[in-house]
Amino acid sequence: MATKRGRKPTGKPPATRASASLPPELYQILQDIAKEKKVSVAWVIRDAAEKYVADQWPLLEKKKL
């Protein structure tokens, strides 16, 4: 039986998965941004969420999510 391959341990706790419904127009814009930056839509959403939290609660920015 073949051994199961996975990602190498990073030392970080596993990420929590979240689900959100977006209007089609917004999702299309996120796809366009992701394509331009050559990243995934998930990466764009994580980046935007981190910036939003840093803007709303500046003291948490130093903690680095």
Image (tube, helix red, strand yellow):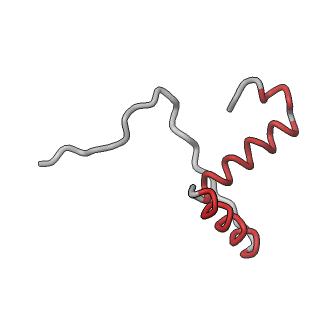
Q: Residue at x 88, y 39 (%)?
A: 56
Quarter location, residue 61: top right
Residue with the most extreme left position: 1
Q: Relative to 65, does residue 24 appear above or below in the rendering?
A: below
Compared with residue 48, is residue 64 higher up or lower down, i.e. above or below? above
Q: Quadrant of the C terminus?
A: top right
Image coordinates of residue 54 in percent, x first then y, are 81, 36
Position of residue 4 in the picture relative to residue 21 (left or right): left
Q: Position of residue 4 (x, y in %)?
A: 24, 45
Q: Residue at x 62, y 56 (%)?
A: 37
Going by the picture, which residue comes out furthest to the bottom? 24
Quadrant position of residue 30: bottom right
In percent of width and height, residue 55 lies at: 86, 39
Q: 57 or 31, which is in the foreground?
A: 31
* Residue at the image position 28 percent from the left and 44 percent from the top: 5
| Residue at the (73%, 24%) spot, across then down | 63
- Farthest-out residue, front: 36
Number of numbered discs: 0
Q: Quadrant of residue 27?
A: bottom right
Q: Which is nearer the eye, 30 or 5?
A: 30
